[in-house]
Amino acid sequence: MRLTTPFAHLQAVPLRTPFPGWRAHVNAAQWSETFSRVRATGGRLVALWGSDERRHAGGFAVHAALHVPEGLLTLSLPLADTPPRYPDVARVFPAAGRMQRAVYDLLGIVADGAADVRPWLRHAAWPEGTHPLRKDFPLEARYPNALDDYAFVRVAGDGVHEIPVGPVHAGTIEPGHFRFSVVGEKILRLEERLGYKHKAIEKLFETKTVEEGVTLAARVSGDATVAYAWAYCMAAESAARTQIPPRAAWLRGLALELERIANHLGDLGYLGNDVALAFGFAQFWRLKEELLRTNAELFGHRYLMDLVVPGGVARDMPLKGPGKLLGLCERLAVEVESLRSIYDEHPGVQDRYVACGRVPPALAEQLGLTGLAGRASGLAWDLRVQFPVPPYDLLDVQMATHRNGDVAARVAVRFDEVQESLRLVRELLENVPGGRIREELGAVDPGAFGVGWVEGWRGEVLVALHVGEGGRIHRCHPHDPSWQNWPVLEHAVLGNIVPDFPLINKSFNLSYSGHDL
């Protein structure tokens, strides 16, 4: 299958992915031109990352994954060693801004012409001019703590003052700093500062073989462990030209839908709690707990961690599994529908939800909002529908959308998605094929490239995998949809009052961990 115009000018090579995928090596002019053409055809930036190629081809490289009408197009732009530079693309896709800043912090690759060149991930944890993802940066390197004097944008005027929140919060959540500029309690501006943990996830990948990498991928963002593990395995299997058994694909789909249901149940509880509906919090968390205990009983882990492995899945469902899950699905469907009627008819809840934290469809499209938050702002995009891989190609997934883009819309999409996932679980259980659950991962050649793309509960998770010598990972980039959505949250809160921020923030529920690599 070839890419059609306007991308036919690229020497794009088809990838062995279960979705339509291509890769093209481009020069700087083609890089810029392709981004403009993708934008003009309604496409999107999915991910952008860099790599150190000095030991192989010389110099560096910057890569991008772009959604085009036919599927996923991956671009690779080779760069000179000194200094490595490439054309800025944030002017085309604003979501690229923070990704480009992260690429500079980690690899020293400069986006020429970028408007914002402040550090994004470097919080004075390593010296300026030092880049931890370069191959000559030792993993064991440590530097003394230093003060981080980040240049927040200042808002001035009569009565304007700042409210700094975080990075340490009252609850057991991960660190993130939110700098509010307000008049009274009305928010004039919000500026985020993330990336405090420096977990070195991407550096650690380079110490592992392709087969070993899935364990790390499954821990990038624990609440989306199935999505990350599946995306990683999809990348590894495409690089190794390995076909997984049909039963394994169906069990992966089952696990992904169970993960979606569990997260939506938990968030719906929190979204009740944030408007003082403690009853909703208690009921939804009771339901989530029942699901997590069932996961542990059937698959050995409450969050299904380490179930998805290269070549298939690590363990089969026990004989009692279908009956137990079908019974649970039946109860959940009834109880969730009952709780939805309470949320919908509660005046206090609706007063807080409706028109709060609104992202209109045009703004959502401009900024690249994705996942369930995008669908709540009218962006009809769901990988399970647009480019379904097995088993979704046989399931006719019904996408949930809304046009209002407020907290109420994001809550409504979650309710719809819970019911659709329960239907999918029932269909998966009733039609799961028999047979093997895992194939041996084939050999991977040095220089091989694979990419995985999965619609997780929060949005699309992408994993790009560059293979090195001896079956080891040369570079692995896991990309969370929160990279696209965190900047949109800054816009969603404008004109709202500060006390509504926790509610708006929870309605997105973005990942700190998936962003803080």
Image: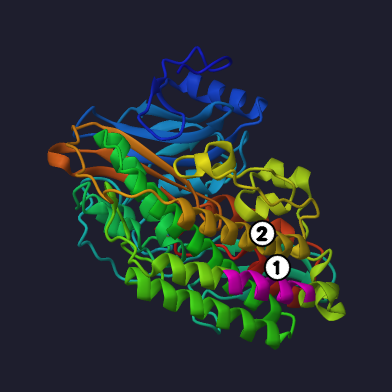
Residue highlighted by disc 1: 504
Asked if the residue under mark 1 is in contact with the one under mark 2, i.e. CB atoms within 8 Å, the reply is yes
What amino acid type should be assigned to the residue bearing mark 2?
A: Leu
Residue lying at 43% horizontally and 75% vertically, measured from the top left: 294
> Is residue 238 depicted above or below 250 in this figure?
above
Residue lying at 32% horizontally and 51% vertically, measured from the top left: 130
What amino acid type should be assigned to the residue bearing mark 1?
A: Ile
| Frontmost residue, 247 versus 17 | 247
Residue lying at 50% horizontally and 18% vertically, measured from the top left: 3
Identify the element where label 2 is drawn: helix
Identify the element where label 1 is drawn: helix
In the rendered image, residue 62, in percent from the top left (x then y), is placed at 40, 34
How was this image coloured?
A: rainbow
Q: Is residue 431 left or right of residue 449?
A: right
Q: Which residues are magenta?
A: 330-341
Residue 326 among magenta residues: no
- The answer to which image quadrant residue 169 occupies is bottom right
Q: Residues within 10 Å of mark 1 (few under 14, many from 20)?
A: many
> Looking at the image, which residue sits at the far left?
470
